[in-house]
């Protein structure tokens, strides 16, 4: 990455303000990458919660996908050395809400063998309830990790 090369040159030149700026940029890039990965697993979690709510059933495969998504969200959200989490409770909720529309679109292709529209599927489920369920499951998984 060119940022590391620029950081090396800044340190060698004694330009510590530039070096600190580059470190901030690298930190932001790393954080953004973590959040994108977390949201990807949130999409999987929401997809299956939407299908469960819409079809009023579950399968072992859906349950396994939910468990795997929760495991990955918890692992990615944990700050190893600094402690705590990348996304706090409020930010987790915001990320879930941001991810919901794409999860709903994907669920439309899978629920009821793909015969319902996004609008039809959305009318069958309680968006707020699904988001709350997803958040509560993530928080419980974080507590038990």
Image: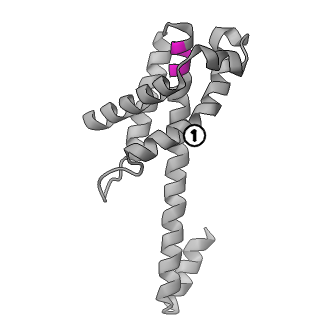
The image shows residue 63, relative to residue 84, as above or below, that is above
**Residue 142 in the figure: left or right of residue 128:** left
Q: Position of residue 5 (x, y in %)?
A: 58, 77
For the stretch drawn in magenta, what is the main secondary structure?
helix
Q: State which region is magenta.
A: 48-53
**Residue 67 in the figure: left or right of residue 110:** left
Q: Position of residue 8 (x, y in %)?
A: 52, 81
Q: Quadrant of residue 142?
A: top left
Residue at screen point 48% across, 65% down: 27
**Residue 3 in the figure: left or right of residue 57:** right
Residue at screen point 51% across, 7% down: 56
Evaluate whether residue 11 shows in this view. no
Is residue 49 magenta-colored? yes
Quadrant where the N terminus sits is bottom right
Q: Position of residue 51 (x, y in %)?
A: 56, 16
The image shows residue 12, relative to residue 21, as above or below, that is below
Q: Nearer the viewer, residue 46 or 122?
A: 122
Residue occupied by mark 1: 98
Quadrant where the C terminus sits is top left
The image shows residue 33, relative to residue 121, as above or below, that is below
Q: How many marks?
A: 1
Residue at screen point 56% across, 17% down: 125
């Amino acid at each position: 990455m060119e940022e590391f090369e620029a950081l090396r040159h800044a340190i060698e030149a004694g330009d510590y303000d530039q070096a600190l700026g580059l470190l901030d940029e690298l930190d932001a890039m790393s954080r953004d990458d973590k959040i994108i990965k977390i949201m990807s697993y949130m999409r999987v979690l929401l997809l299956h919660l939407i299908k469960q709510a819409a079809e009023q059933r579950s399968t072992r495969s859906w349950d396994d996908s939910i468990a795997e998504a929760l495991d990955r969200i918890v692992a990615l959200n944990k700050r190893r050395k600094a402690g705590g989490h990348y996304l706090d409770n409020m930010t987790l909720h915001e990320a879930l809400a941001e991810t919901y529309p794409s999860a709903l679109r994907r669920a439309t292709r899978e629920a009821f063998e793909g015969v319902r529209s996004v609008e039809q599927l959305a009318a069958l489920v309680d968006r707020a309830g699904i988001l709350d369920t997803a958040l509560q499951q993530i928080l419980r998984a974080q507590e038990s990790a």
